[in-house]
Image: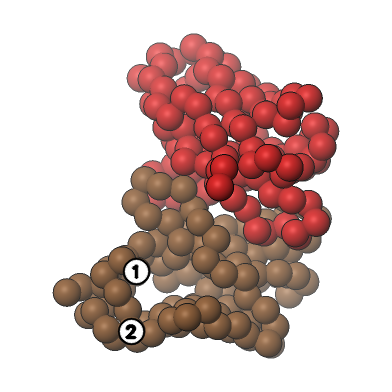
Chain colours: A red, B brown
Amino acid sequence: AAGVIQSPRHLIKEKRETATLKCYPIPRHDTVYWYQQGPGQDPQFLISFYEKMQSDKGSIPDRFSAQQFSDYHSELNMSSLELGDSALYFCASSLAGSGIGELFFGEGSRLTVL
Amino acid sequence: RKEVEQDPGPFNVPEGATVAFNCTYSNSASQSFFWYRQDCRKEPKLLMSVYSSGNEDGRFTAQLNRASQYISLLIRDSKLSDSATYLCVVNAGGGADGLTFGKGTHLIIQP
């Protein structure tokens, strides 16, 4: 079965650069979530989209933005990168009707900021 | 105080033993509860939802105690492949922002 696809899997950037992460949800899933997980930390919710509209916003820095496109894929744009942005970024998708909590995660994009 | 708390462990358990760990939550209005499993440097994967009546899936049993505001996960006949971090997830409502992950309990099954 198709899973959530994230790209790139690994990304190395310098401070103050920009980065874009992509997420392709499971087909027919209508909700996409972005999470940030630092080393030894729990996943922190950044932002979510339902049917291409932003539905909820968590602890996403103002330097970050995200959107969901007509084909349901989503992109997380990160600008003015800081050392503290180094983390594993997960995208997850779900069917809204399944209730919030049953998420299917992608394998993550590991961002390293030097 | 964090909304969702777990003993980080590690829990070192011999293969074949039974192990249980709890997760406490602070918001009494929390609506739904889940256990996720996360292997090192991998994505979290849904292990099971936790229902009010408790639920069992093979060697895994999850319980909810609303009065004391905790959920539990019991693993019977533990296997080496059960070694992972188990994340407690609580939905306090209000959308995706109301979904809170615990920091996880690290379980190591030893041969």
Viewer-nearest residue: B15 or B19: B15
Viewer-nearest residue: A14 or A111: A111
- Please tell me whether mark 2 sits on a helix, a strand or a loop: loop
Q: Which residue is mark 1?
A: B82
Q: What number is the disc on residue A75?
A: none
Task: Say yes or no: labels 1 and 2 on the same chain.
Answer: yes
Looking at the image, which residue sits at the far left? B111
Viewer-nearest residue: A71 or B91: A71
Residue B69 placement (x, y as % from top left) = 64, 80
Local packing at callout 2 (Cα closer than 10 Å; few below 14, some 14-19, many 20+) is few
- Please tell me whether mark 1 sits on a helix, a strand or a loop: helix
Chain letter for the residue marked with disc 1 in the picture: B
Spatial CA distance of label 1 from label 2 is 10 Å
The relative height of residue A72 versus residue B65 in the rendered view (above or below) is above
Query: Going 67% across and 29% down the picture, which residue do you hit?
Result: A73
Residue B41 placement (x, y as % from top left) = 36, 46
Looking at the image, which residue sits at the far front? A1
Q: Tell me the amino acid under the disc marked 1.
A: Asp
Q: Is residue B39 visible?
A: yes
Q: Image check: B8 left or right of B98? A: left
Residue A108 placement (x, y as % from top left) = 48, 38
Query: Going 64% across and 38% down the picture, which residue do you hit?
Result: A25
Q: Image check: B14 left or right of B9? A: left
Instruction: Assign the N terminus of chain B to one quadrant of the image.
Output: bottom right
Q: Is residue A62 visible?
A: no
Local packing at callout 1 (Cα closer than 10 Å; few below 14, some 14-19, many 20+) is some
Q: Which residue is mark 2?
A: B77
In which image quadrant can residue A93 be found?
A: top right
Q: Tell me the amino acid under the disc marked 2.
A: Asp
The relative height of residue A50 versus residue A95 in the rendered view (above or below) is above
